[in-house]
Amino acid sequence: MGVPLMDLSGQWRPLHARIQAAVAEVIESGVFILGPNVRALEEETAADLGVAHAVGVANGTDALILALRVHGVGAGDEVICPAYTFYATPESIAAVGATPVFADIDPATYQLDPDAVAACVTPRTRAIMAVHLFGHPAPMAALRVIADAHGLLLIEDAAQAYGASLDGVRCGAIGDIATFSFFPTKNLGGFGDGGLVTTPDGDVAERIRELRFHGSKDKRTFTQVGMNSRLDELQAAILRVLLPELPGWNEARRAVAARYLELGIDRFVEPPATAPGAEPIYHLYMARCRDRDAVQAALKAAEVGAVVYYDTPHHLQPVFADLGYAPGSLPETERAARECIALPMYPTLAADQQAAVVGALEASLAPIA
Ligand SMILES: Cc1ncc(COP(=O)(O)O)c(C=O)c1O
C-alpha cells in the first residue's frame, strides 16, 4: 500500500515502553475489573472534558444504550437522530425499545440539520441524539433551542469526537448526557473495546454505575435489570497513557487537513467544511466527489487507501424497513452516502504521502472548479 487510509502504529510507537509498564502493573495488581485505573480514567476524562462525571463502560454502543436507559427512554418513545452515522446510533435507540426518527443533514458539515430535526418533533419525541460525525461538532446551540422548546433530552454521540469542541466547549460537555467509544481506531482508542458516558448530573452518574453492574449497588441486592458493561483495568491503564498525548495527535490531524488544502485537494474533491465556532478533530477526512467511482479508481491505481462509509444510510437499511422510509426521503443524507469517501488521515501522515494522494487525483481527474 502506497498510502494507507489509517496507520496509528506511528503514534503509539514512542509509548510502547510506558504502555507495557502500565499493563505489567495491572497484571501484578491482580485487579482487572473496575479498579483504580478505571476510577482514575473517569476522573481524568471528566476533568479533561470539563464535565462533572464520567463513567467507564464496555464500549460506545453500551454507552448509548445506558444514556437512554438511565433517562427512562424506551417503548413508545421517539428519538431523533441522523441516518448518516455508524449503525450503533440508531441501533441503541431500537435496542431500548424506542423508535429512531431520522432527520436529514446539512450538506456542508454532514451534521444534523436543525430545521429537519424541528420538523421531526411529535408528541412522542423524547430525545435528540446528535452525532459529532467524523469528529466535527453537531450544531448543538440550535439543537438545544429545539430540545428546550419541547422538553427533550439532548444526547451527544461523541464516539468519533474526543477532543473536538464547539465555541470553546468540548464535545461531551455540551448536551444533557454524552457518550464516547474507545474502539482502537478512534482518536482516543484503546487496545480493545471500551466506552464512556459523561453527565453533569451526579445522580445520573451513580445510576449508570449501577446499571453497568447488573443494576446493583452492592452486588447482592438486585433492584432492576441492568447490564454487564464494565471497562476493564487493562484498557483503562492503556488509555491513561494515551490521554495526555491526544491533544498533540488531534493537532497533527488538523495540520494534515490544512496541508491537504495547501496541496490543492479542493481542485479535485470537496474537502470537509468547518462550521463557525467548531474545532474538529478529523476522525475521518471525508471528501465529497463529483464522480466517486473515478476518484476511487484513481486512488486504487496509486495504492492509496480510501474507504466509503455508510453508503446505505440507516433509513434505507433492511432492519428499519418497517419504519416506511422511501428512497429520496432524506435527500442530503442520500447524496452524502453516494458522493463521499474517506481519504488518508492520521497524525503521522507525512507531507510526501499527502502529496502522493493529491498527485493520484491530479493524474487521473479533471479539476472540478
Ligand atoms: C458514531 C458512533 N457511535 C457509536 C459507536 C459505537 O462504539 P463502539 O464500537 O465502541 O460500540 C461508534 C463506533 O464505532 C460510532 O462511530
Image (cartoon, rainbow, N blue to C red):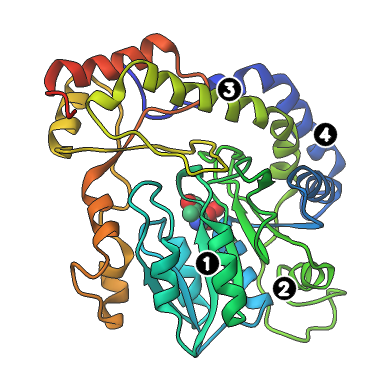
In the image, residue 125 above or below residue 107: below
Check disc 1 and report the residue beneath it. Answer: 129
Q: Earlier in the sequence, mark 2 or mark 4?
A: 4
Tags 2 and 4 in contact by the CB under 8 Å rule? no
Measure how far apart labels 4 and 1 are at the Cα level.
38 Å
Q: Residue at x 25, y 31 (%)?
A: 269
Tell me the amino acid under the disc marked 3: Gln
State the separation of the CA atoms marked 4 and 3: 22 Å
The reply to whether discs 1 and 2 touch (Cβ–Cβ < 8 Å) is no
Between residues 279 and 285, which one lies in front from this camera angle?
A: 279
Question: Could one spot residue 318 in this view of the protein?
Answer: yes
Residue designated by label 3: 11
Q: Earlier in the sequence, mark 3 or mark 1?
A: 3
Mark carried by residue 332? none
- Name which residue type carries label 1: Met
- Other-residue count near label 3 (Cα within 10 Å), few / some / many at <14 / 14–19 / ≥20: some
Residue that mark 4 sits on: 25
Q: Earlier in the sequence, mark 4 or mark 3?
A: 3
C-alpha separation, residue under disc 2 versus residue under disc 4: 28 Å
Report crowding for label 2: few under 14, some 14 to 19, many 20 or more residues within 10 A (C-alpha).
many
Q: 10 Å neighbourhood of mark 4: few (<14), some, or many (≥20)?
A: some
Distance from the alpha carbon under mark 1 to that under mark 2: 20 Å
Q: Secondary structure at mark 3?
A: helix
The residue at 40%/77% (across/down) is 120
Residue 25 lies, in percent from the top left, at: 82, 34
Q: Is residue 1 visible?
A: no
